[in-house]
Image (cartoon, rainbow, N blue to C red):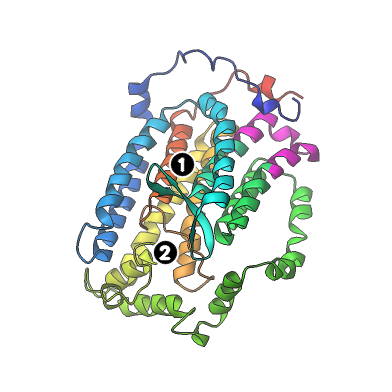
Amino acid sequence: MNAFGFLKPEKRLLRAEPDFRPLAQLLQVNWLYVLLVCLLAGVGYVALYSAGGGSARPFAGPQMMRFGFGLVMMVAVSLVSPRILRLLSVPLYLFSIALLTLVLRMGHVGKGAERWINLAGMQFQPSEFAKIALVLMLATWFYRIGPDRMGNPLRLVPPALLTLLPVLLVLKEPNLGTATIIGVIGATMFFAAGMRLWQIIILVAPIPFLGKFAYSHLHDYQKARIDTFLHPEHDPLGAGYNIIQSKIALGSGGMWGEGYLRGSQGQLNFLPEKQTDFIFTMIGEEWGFVGGIAVIGLLATLTLGGMLIAMRSRNQFGRLLGLGIAMDFFLYCAVNLSMVMGAIPVGGVPLPLISYGGSAMLTMMFGFGLLMSAWVHRNERDPGMEEDAEA
């Protein structure tokens, strides 16, 4: 296979799939996992209802409408054949790069970063879609070359460039948190695809030495976030206000919480961004340690379930695709929870399906659809796999 052989169309793609049986495939969908996704969205509705002061407006109602659309999309994507997904991987990746470029030119400026563009009257964050597009693109690439050819360093140059391009574009916005997540997702898929230990050491070894260089090129507000993370008490009414209020709210919840719609920090609007970045803080305040652990348990179950779905796939494409989506979901959760608890600097990463926002909701549901596709078609073996992997 040449360097860009993955662009070659697959056999049988241009004609109807003889094994396409939508009703039978619907029965193959992992409905238990879908139920868990719905349960998580229900937690989000309850939390956003409280964030709206005991009203479905302005947060909970619109969020559930988005989820309803996303649920239909998730089920529809789950029926799409892996062959079709591999065919779509290139245009979807190129589309995501085009959107990331567009947001730099005409994006909505918020909190020091250009991250949003308006599409059909709706604000859309291209970096969220770029993560899913990258997962699909890398899964296609590594499926084509096969694990046996991962020892050739030249085979790793194209996927490395495919990963680096969206990372650099997101850094340019600037959005350090999301750029880091994209990079970690890419690195995870490299490892899962069979990257050799010596190759991993070569890539990881320079990282500790790049810390000082990277810090010197951070924007002022990014340096302020790091300083606030280390010393929030230095500016309790300014840069340190958010994290201090978050810790107060979490602490005031105690074991059982202050009660639904009765959280003092949230209901009196002391808690900043309570409907987005700090939604888990509101949950912890109202439902306490027990409620917080229950939500974390649900998030962990969805993460582990996604990884198990990936491992059940009998082809490498399904395994890599499922793992990439599960890792994306895990990083969403890990970064947001660590942020609101003060373990890492505040970075503006939402809690999936709970935080208010359309971009993260719809792209995550699209990702779950890809995960379900890996499950529905887990037993498929592409007859042209060996031919596509030939040099």
User: On residue 367, which mark appears?
Assistant: 1
Look at the magenta stretch and give its main secondary structure. Answer: helix
Callout 1 secondary element: helix
Q: Residue furthest left?
A: 54
Callout 2 secondary element: loop
Q: Is residue 65 magenta?
A: no
Q: Residue at x 68, y 19 (%)?
A: 387
Please state which of residues 323 and 368 is positioned toward the viewer in this rendering.
368
- The residue where tag 2 is placed is 277
Pick the quarter of the image with the N terminus: top right
Residue 377 visible from this viewpoint: yes
Instruction: Please report whichever mark, 2 or 1, sits nearer to the chain's N-terminal start.
Output: 2
Q: Is residue 345 left or right of 281 when viewed as pictured?
A: right
Above or below, 96 against 264 in this view is: above
Q: CA distance from mark 2 to mark 1?
A: 21 Å
Pinpoint residue 98: horizontal percent, then vertical percent: 57, 41
User: On residue 203, which mark appears?
Assistant: none
Above or below, 359 against 15 in this view is: below
Q: Residue at x 41, y 55 (%)?
A: 299
Of the two numbered discs 2 and 1 in the rendering, the one whose residue sits closer to the viewer: 2
Assess disc 2: are there few (<14), some (14-19) or many (≥20) residues with their C-alpha within 10 Å of its C-alpha. many
Q: Is residue 391 left or right of 182 when viewed as pictured?
A: right
Image: magenta residue range: 139-161
What amino acid does circle 1 point to?
Gly
Pinpoint residue 365: horizontal percent, then vertical percent: 40, 43
Above or below, 326 against 92 in this view is: below
Residue 152 visible from this viewpoint: no
Pinpoint residue 175: horizontal percent, then vertical percent: 56, 59
Q: Is residue 131 left or right of 3 when viewed as pictured?
A: left
